[in-house]
Amino acid sequence: MISEPLSIKQKFIKRLLDISLSLIGLILSFLFLGILLILTSIHTKSFGLLSQTRIGQYGKPFQLLKLKTMIIDGEDTTFITTSKDPRITKFGHFLRKTKLDELPQLWNVLFGEMSFVGPRPDVSGYADQLEGDDKIILSVKPGITGPASLAFRDEEELLAQKDNPKQYNDEVIWPQKVKINKAYVENYSFKNDLMYVIKTILG
């Protein structure tokens, strides 16, 4: 059983913010997103929109949308990515550095699968394996940004410096993210959400 730390009022206000910001974002970026999609398709030589299965609220999987930044073999199942990954295109490096590859996630927010602020949605094997009090993280929708995302904004560069990126992610970065995200949920406030959105926009 996953506890519900947010009140009905907090959930309503958070959802209202998500709908408002995602609608504004989609309207303002519609043409820009279309141009990025065309450029991404050219650089990856395939349709530039990527759909990946991620773990959402209450551990339920959903399809996360991203602009494609890599040329991936059909049998490639590696999800730990570093800045030195040879699969990333030149344009993909730009998209990942600026976080523009995550722009399509405004649709995920509008559809209610994600929130603007929250723990980043993980692939199977991480958030869905949380135990005990750590499961409180799954009580909220995953977010485009959040305290853990901001703390590890240079995660790919950090992983590129390690001999075993996956091991470092699993043994060092992931436990720290769990701690940060758990504190976020336990001490949730609308004021903090606004602060994380502003910090993300300002870079």
Image (spheres, helix red, strand yellow):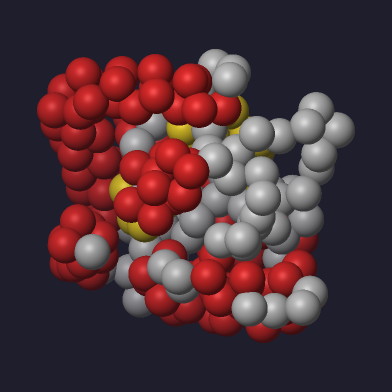
Above or below, 189 against 57 in this view is below
Q: Residue at x 30, y 21 (%)?
A: 35
Measured as percent of width and height from the top left, residue 183 is found at 44, 78
Q: Residue at x 48, y 20 (%)?
A: 42
Instruction: Determine the image quadrant of residue 29.
Output: top left
Question: Looking at the rendering, in which quadrant would you find the C terminus?
Answer: bottom left
Measured as percent of width and height from the top left, residue 106 is found at 33, 34
Q: Is 81 situated left or right of 182 in this image?
A: right
Above or below, 162 against 201 in this view is below
Residue ranking furthest to the right: 75
**Residue 43 visible in rendering:** yes
Measured as percent of width and height from the top left, residue 16 is found at 21, 39
Query: Looking at the image, which is closer to me, 94 or 114?
Result: 94
Query: Looking at the image, which is closer to me, 120 or 89?
Result: 89
Q: Residue at x 19, y 39 (%)?
A: 21
Query: Looking at the image, which is closer to me, 33 or 43?
Result: 43
Q: Residue at x 58, y 20 (%)?
A: 45
Q: Is 158 situated left or right of 165 in this image?
A: left
Q: Is 44 situated left or right of 92 in this image?
A: right
Query: Looking at the image, which is closer to me, 35 or 8?
Result: 35
Above or below, 10 against 146 in this view is above
